[in-house]
Amino acid sequence: MKNSVVKIDNLVKRYGDLTALDHLSLDIAEGEVFGLLGPNGSGKTTTINCLLSLLTYDKGDIELFGKKMSPTAYNIKKEIGVIMQNVAVFDELTVYENIDYFCGLYINDKAQRKQYVDEAVKFVGLEEFLKSRPKKLSGGLLRRLNIACGIAHKPKLIILDEPTVAVDPQSRNKILEGIEQLNREGATVIYTSHYMEEVEQICTRIAIMDKGKKIAEGTKDELKRMIRNTETMNIEIIDLPDEVRSKISVLPHVYNTEYDGSKLTVYCSGGKHNLTRVLGVLQEHELGFGRVYSELPTLNDVFLEITGKALRDKED
Ligand code: ADP
Ligand code: MG
């Protein structure tokens, strides 16, 4: 059994009439990159704030590193690095001074601090911006500074709350690679996001949240095995007659179809040769079609099957 890093038991948090966390339990072990995946408002940030004792809660128990967490548990807090959803750095300080300040909260020895700060700068790739003030940085670089401030003291547990929102692709990749590297070097990571692709890419285990509840948990493969979808086919086709769509709907393994006037989507559950059979029906009716592509299940399909709604809006 791996050591427990986070143990949340039956956590309930209310804001007035709203139940933001509804009997949430989580167990996170040393060495994991644990993903909290859920749409906006599902309770991810509230979970993190309760975990850090920044918020009081109505019910439940929280242990970190096997010890009860409390607002004054400083020996626990120094082992944690937090990168909050809203960037929190000092505008009056330069990039270097910001990282040095946050590192200095934990590391007193000057020589060691300098080494740690230099390592953090290199880690996020901000060498060329040491003397810049935060206001001069792009969104992506600012995020990287925020991360450097959170990890410079080499915490055992690193918590990142939506660190890639409003970040350019280059910084985003750098952030995701960085998280994997920190994990390889021994840190346990909690990563919250509403981007399923990122969570799939870097997380060893994932809890899917909706309305303050954990609706599913497992590795990405375990989560995908929980649902009936095994394949989604997309076929570009104009003027598909209803009778043809009906024929496709009753093919073996097909459990749903959607048609928007230019694209037919066919949802399948198990089986082989599904695509051949679907295209066979179209050919039988001498219907031409454009691009055809098949998709394996995503975490969005998991969310969709469990909650009946998409994980995120299309424009997101
Ligand atoms: P997420 O981080 O997943 O987007 P949050 O934890 O921020 O979700 O929010 C969970 C729910 O609690 C949302 O419905 C949100 O509107 C509500 N909420 C969050 N913070 C407060 C607050 N300070 N006062 C009242 N309601 C809040
Ligand atoms: Mg949030």
Image (tube, rainbow, N blue to C red):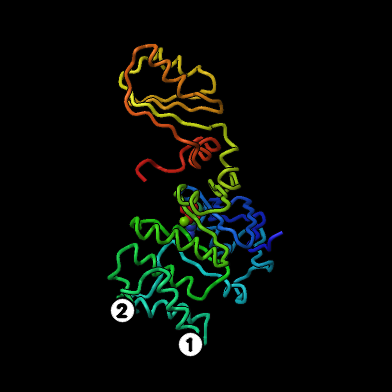
Mark toward the start of the polypeptide (2 vs 1): 1
Rendering coords of residue 154 (x, y %): 53, 73
Rendering coords of residue 190 (x, y %): 54, 59
Q: Nearer the viewer, residue 132 or 38?
A: 132
Quarter assignment of residue 95:
bottom left
Quarter assignment of residue 167:
bottom left
Q: Quadrant of the N terminus?
A: bottom right
Rendering coords of residue 307 (x, y %): 53, 38
Residue found farthest to the left: 136
Say what secondary structure mark 1 lies in: helix
- The residue carrying mark 2 has its beta carbon less than 8 Å from ligand 2: no
For disc 1, the neighbor class at 10 Å (few under 14, some 14 to 19, many from 20) is few
Camera-near label (2 vs 1) is: 1
Rendering coords of residue 253 (x, y %): 54, 23
Residue at 42% over, 15% down: 281
Confirm or deny contact between disc 2 and disc 1 (CB under 8 A): no
Q: Which residue is mark 1?
A: 111
Q: Nearer the viewer, residue 65 or 209?
A: 65
Q: Which mark is residue 80?
A: none
User: Hey, what amino acid is under mark 1?
Assistant: Ala
Residue at 46% over, 77% down: 102
Along the horizontal axis of the image, is 242 left or right of 13?
left
Q: Which residue is mark 2?
A: 131
Say what secondary structure mark 2 lies in: loop
- Distance between the alpha carbons at the discs numbered 2 and 1: 20 Å
Along the horizontal axis of the image, is 37 left or right of 237?
right
User: Hey, what amino acid is under mark 2?
Assistant: Lys
Quarter assignment of residue 293:
top left
Residue at 64% over, 60% down: 29
